[in-house]
Image (spheres, rainbow, N blue to C red):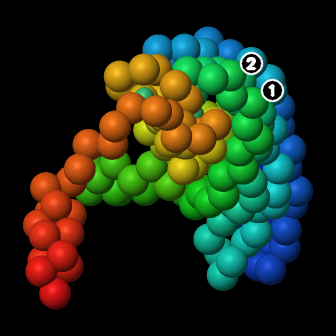
Amino acid sequence: MLLNVSPLKNKPGGTMPFRVDLDLHTFAFGGCRPVTEPVIADGSVRNTAGVLVMSGTVTTTLHGVCDRCARDVVRTVEYPLHAVLTEENVDLDGEEDPWLFPLENDCADLDDIVTTTFVLSMESKLLCKEDCKGLCPRCGKNWNDGPCDCRPEVDPRLAVLNQLLKKE
Ligand SMILES: [Zn+2]
Ligand SMILES: [Zn+2]
């Protein structure tokens, strides 16, 4: 979807809302395709002293399998969207800044901006929760359900500490 920002160009302080739904279900991530629901972006573009700044949020609900414990994951994610829209012939000195997006004929390519924001914001792993404890490598028990009966491997540093504590 293209967003025509020409009404904003000569209106310092002016704003314009935007909203777009994207289908990114073909996007592969960590061996699966967790983006089964639409990716929704909304926010506004503001003319800040002649610079067009776009801000808002990108949200969706991911469906996949936890990278650590293999449990089903259904997680709503929300990422901030921040982009600066520039005229197409701005010289960026060959620098690839992902937050700068070109305007073509006064139009911003919302699909491109939202897709880029989404892909760059995603965590490197899909986890059922941030502190997922994973599976016991020996018995396979899901440690999120509590500890298993395997003997814990003692951290060598802790072993030294235990020795010291015993002496005192
Ligand atoms: Zn997990
Ligand atoms: Zn175990």
Which amino acid type is marked by label 2? Thr
- The residue under the point 69% across, 28% down is 73
Q: Residues within 10 Å of mark 1 (few under 14, many from 20)?
A: some
* Image: 81 above or below 14: above
Q: In which quarter of the image is residue 85?
A: bottom right
In the picture, which quadrant includes the C terminus?
bottom left
Please tell me whether mark 1 sits on a helix, a strand or a loop: loop
Residue 118 in sight: no
Q: Mark 2 — residue?
A: 36
Which amino acid type is marked by label 1? Pro
Percent across and percent down for residue 10 are 77, 70
Cα–Cα span, label 1 and label 2: 7 Å
Look at the numbered discs 1 and 2 and tell me whether their residues touch, using CB distance below 8 Å: no
Q: Which of the labelled discs sits on residue 38, or is there none?
A: 1
- The foreground one among 95 and 38 is 38
Q: Can you tell me whether the CB of the residue at mark 2 lies under 8 Å from the nearest atom of ligand 1?
A: no
- The foreground one among 19 and 73 is 73
Q: Is residue 156 left or right of residue 145?
A: left
- The foreground one among 64 and 82 is 64
